[in-house]
Image (cartoon, rainbow, N blue to C red):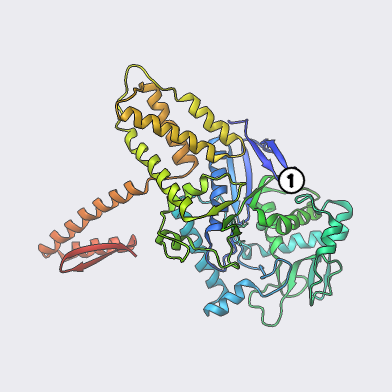
Amino acid sequence: MNTGLQLYNTLTRKKELFEPLNAPHVGMYVCGPTVYSDVHLGNCRTFISFDLIFRYLKYSGYKVRYVRNITDAGHLEGDRDEGDDKFAKRAKLEQLEPMEIVQKYTLGFHDVLRMFNTLPPSIEPTATGHIIEQIEMIKEIMNNGYAYEANGTIYFDVEKYSKNYNYTILTNRNLEDMLANTRELGGQDEKRGRLDFALWIKAKPETLMRWASPWGEGFPGWHIECSAMSAKYLGAEFDIHGGGMDLAATHHTNEIAQSEACSHKQPAKYWMHTNMLTVNGTRMSKSAGNGFLPEQLFAGDHDLLEKGFSPMTVKFFMLQAHYRSTLDFSNEALDASEKGFKRLMNALSLLDKLSPAESSDFEIDPIIENCIKAMNDDFNSPVVIAELFEASRIINTVYDGKGKISIIELDKLKQLMQDFVYDIFGLKDEESSNVELNSVLDMVIDLRKTAKENKDYATSDKIRIGLQSMGIQLKDSKEGTTWNKA
Ligand code: AMP
Ligand code: ZN
């Protein structure tokens, strides 16, 4: 097991040696998407960053339980218990049931992450599936004296909590300044303190998503779902809690407060935050209107895009930045990543064609050591990529007959590429998989043509319907048969 991993802990604001509470088991919780609309590329960056972390922990020999939730209820438009319910608003707009909205965008989210070749989490719990756990947790917080009821809504009492705990532990802000800078919110006079936040919100007559509770019908506040579900699946204390940096100040701060007020325990030993994807320096977000959908990027279908870029090019572009640095989107940067990714894939395609020699001009161990050292230094993927280019240079040199490599070093080179390119970065060769699919389909289409010529319509239909069930549509015309993905 790799025991030299250092990671940056937002809680202590420094890099620390990773020492899980119960090695080799690791519990990791990452805040997932709010599924009321399509995920944009910025959201994808955060999930791709945690996929890298998940994959590297597994490579390092840990048994990871990775929990990533789906927020499918309770997220109001404002982060401070104000505004409309995002799901209800969208449901009205699209003339669908709120749960149809949830289903539609959950499926879309999974499709997008599959295109980026990320691994599914071990558990993907939903807020609506854990109403009972959330109510139980709220009851416990009330029993401990850290929450109060006002007209059927339950608020967390930040002032009371701050007497025993540090509300700004994650952000190191000054509580007095925060109080001074927090706006009074209209219609929320029932709150005792300006920083108090809702744990349970009383349903209005028009509220669509509502559940019975000891305080009447209502729905949970946004923050409580993560505290309840992380405790349920990972325990009151677990190893890593993550999410985008924008979540630290409110959502994660409130999660820590809830967990401490319930179990008197700081939930996660390490808090990890990924930095934002920006466009011309502005954070990509739904509200700023600069959020492309991954599909738009792949197809080049957006005013800001000069052309389309493949999922693996986009993923490679993201891995070329450290997860804690901002990453600015530009056509030029993506062009450069496209070239770099092709260079890497070209070298990989030559790897099996190299013939080993008696002796070797190259040693692979230093490259492997540098890759591990970089990943152990808070998952420094850009440094690994520089090392992979060095490995590509060796492959090209040997292929061109300008250098030789022994069988031992060649095997190490192959293992290096397998581990870092495929297993840890989760990249894949898009060209070759398309080439394979193309030739297989050409053959199947040819078989169907023969069956039709022999009037064996049972077989030709079976082929067409079989392909259809795999999402491949055949189209017959005078010129012949073509196919496309449905
Ligand atoms: P949401 O669906 O808005 O709750 O966001 C899902 C995840 O994406 C959260 O962890 C956010 O912090 C993260 N996120 C949102 N915008 C960006 C961005 N521009 N770059 C990186 N991550 C983001
Ligand atoms: Zn969360």
Instruction: Look at the picture and state if 398 lies above or below 113.
Output: above
Report how many numbered discs are placed on residues in the image.
1
Residue 146 shows up from this direction: no
User: Furthest-bottom residue in view?
Assistant: 205
Residue for point 67% across, 53% down: 230
User: Furthest-left residue in view?
Assistant: 454
- Residue 123: image x %, image y %? 57, 52
Q: Is mark 1 on a helix, strand or loop?
A: loop
Side (left or right) of 461 relative to 108: left
- Residue 375: image x %, image y %? 57, 36
User: For ligand 1, which image quadrant applies?
Assistant: bottom right
Dot 1: few (<14), some (14–19), or many (≥20) neighbours within 10 Å?
Answer: some
Q: Name the residue under label 1.
A: 11
Side (left or right) of 149 relative to 59: right
Instruction: Look at the picture and state if 340 lies above or below 180.
Output: above
Side (left or right) of 424 relative to 172: left
Looking at the image, which is closer to me, 72 or 296?
296
Residue for point 72% across, 72% down: 82
